[in-house]
Amino acid sequence: MEAILQSAFVQDIATLARPALFNLYFALASIPVGFPLAVLLALGKASRFKIISRLSRGYIYAFRGSPLFIQFFMFYSMMLALNQAYLKPWGIDGVVLHPLFLGPMVLVLNTSAYGAEIFYGALKTVPKGEVEAASAMGMGRWSVFRSVTWPNMLRLAWPAYTNEMVFLFHATTLVYFTLPVVNEQKDLMNKAGELFERDYNVFLHFSVAALYFLVLSILIFWLAGLVHKRLNQHLTGRAEKIRFKPGYIR
Amino acid sequence: MLETLPDWLSGLFSEDVRSSLAYITNGKHLAWYASIRFTLIAAIGGATVAVLFGLVGAALKQSRIMPFKLIGDFYTTIVRGVPDVLFILFFPLAFEQAVEYFLARSVCEPEVLAAATQWPPCEAAQWFLTTTDYLIMACVSLGIVYGAFAANVIHGAMQAVPKGQLEAAAAYGFTPRQVFWRFKVRQMWVYALPGLSNVWMLLLKATSLLSLLQIADIVQWAARLGSANYYSRVGLVHPDWRWKYYLVLFVFFIVMTMLSERFFAALQARASRGMSLAGSD
Amino acid sequence: MKKILLSMVLASAVIATPAMSETVRIGTEGAYAPYNYVDDNGKLAGYEIDLGNALCAEAGLTCEFVANEWDSIIPNLVAGNYDAIMAGMSITDERKQTINFSEEYYPSEPSKYAAAAGMSFDMMSLSGKKIGVQGATIQAAYAEEHFGANNTIMSFKTFDDSVADLAAGNLDLLLADGDPLNPVIEASAGALAFVGEGVRIGGGVGIGMRKDDTDLAVKMNAAIAALKANGTVDKLIKEYFDNGPFYAQ
């Protein structure tokens, strides 16, 4: 027992536990904002107003069409350029330029574009008959949306959105490759790299980091699966279970 | 660069335009433009490896022999369960150490090998990695990561090939191997194209990570060019211009995505001539 | 299958072997003017590039400079991506545990603090300040040790990045080598200034080499001694750093 606890593998698991929290933090801080934004953008893309539709489409295209790695670099240097004139006078520079804020901010901008594309796709496949039936019953546009379009869209998009959340979690590795490191705030990749530079044991440190990502990804799938089950409660026996099967389309 | 223009042409520009033109065509900028080759090589090389891994992975996944199927499923699941950056950093390091391990066993003196406390055990077992080596390894690691994506796409596409056609081929006396390669794999491409185009887009964006492998790629040069310069000996003295250069890269990748979309749309139109593909998008 | 894999690995290793002996590869950062930088022609240049070439000529070696990011410059030396480091790296006891150093080729200089002009700080009792350093430098270790408890230490990938944050007002203080800071302060036209006393943290600047690469160390030390004696080192220091410090008295 003693020997196991002292083994390099277990030591690594202990050392990387705190850094793993940073990856989790970045994901957990981004999803609650990224989700509603994605829904809004999807509705925007489907909007009948040309300007709104074009703007949403352009935003989604730009953020899905360029690498997150560059988005991080770009936004940090842009914020820095705006600092003296706009951020400092408001006294918000310390917050805005902090990786714990800017990291999730860029992740939100990125994931909302990917999420929007997913929700837009689901919006297009909401059964027309149900919407028409609701309108025929005299429901207003808002009521139709709330009681027919929205639940259908969410239910249809959920498996793909689960994937997006896992992708987002993986993308949190890029934060400290691009932004400055504050004090001892390091994420899994950062810390694994630091451990590697001490003893060059690439197999050990990177495997433990990979293990953390794998386990946490499975956890996200499991939690999302519970939500999925709820969303499909009314469809007896028709709901497909979400298993740990990361998607291949982002 | 600008000096090579004939006088009548350079005379058309104002002094300001001429100096800006001279600046964006200086050696440092030319090096930036030229570094696009690394991005393109990694993308195309990575895509080639990815298709190979995808085919092998898909073949394994649909194998009836249990261990093969397990290997296929394990590969596609594990690679997708970890971030691509992790793998792209891990693979070259791990491969280098593996090579040095075998090298050490053949070139180091046995007593040195036994007493070694550091890596590699002796100086002769050092494997020197150049940019070319890193680029090849970047292609392979991108290929392995996105090969797992491609494997799933190809696996799905193989299932989509109409069974009747394969049965007809078998009835004509083709062997199972012939049926697989000449009918299933040939026809599969049409169904796989939309998915593979998506994988290509992901791979293209992942090539922005090359600088993490010490390759002086477009991202690295953009940082070098954009960083403020205070020292006239180095070149033009200017404040922090990084965001402008990153904005150019941002747009560059969006344009590459657009071009890729066009290319795949044309390919799809060509590939699906004479096929009725109701229900596929 | 295993055999094929093994022979593939060995084959690639054999292809890689010839590159080992002939040219000495020197790793540098290319972002630390005037020590080393990428000039407007896109080529590596600077004090260390000129000196490195002079040293190699003296020692009868063929040399080639390669750029490598600072934070992985020691690991990649040890991993064997190049044979020597000339990147403004101070000789410290901590680094000596991993790598070997030549005799110094640039004298020890104090590190300096830079800040927005008009600010003053009590260096003895700094607290609540944002202090910038380049990661994995002697300044980073110093700041962590002396100010880590009461201040925020921000570590950047490159020296340029840290200066950019200082110039943009995202840092209260920047702790860095004096030599690269000098042109920054000069060119800022009064916006930035040195504050407080400099601190002497590390030793002089030396060539970093792998510990078992003793041949190269002997050759380089001999070449450094020779070039110091004939005044080449001082001439280059004069060219790049203007007013010294010089080796000749």
Image (cartoon, coloured by chain):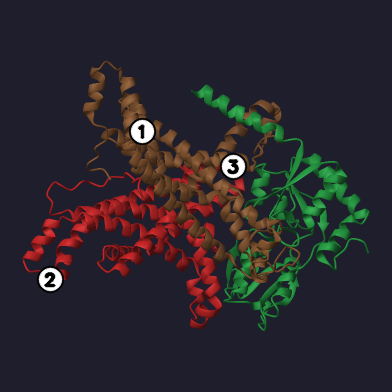
* Lateral position of residue B153 relative to residue A140, left or right: right
Disc 3 target residue: B134
Q: Residue type at mark 3: give it.
A: Tyr
Q: CA distance from mark 3 to mark 2?
A: 61 Å
Residue B221: x percent and y percent? 61, 56
C189 over A41 or under it: above or below: below
Q: Mark 1 or mark 3, which has the lower sequence index?
A: 1
Q: Which numbered dot is residue B84?
A: none
Chain for numbered disc 1: B
| Chain corresponding to red in the figure | A
- Quarter the C terminus of chain B occupies: top left
What chain does mark 2 sit on? Answer: A
How far separated are the C-alphas under marks 1 and 3?
A: 28 Å
| Chain appearing in green on the rendered image | C
Q: Amino acid at mark 2?
A: Gly
Q: Is residue B78 visible?
A: yes
The brown-coloured chain is labelled B
The circle drawn on residue B58 is: 1
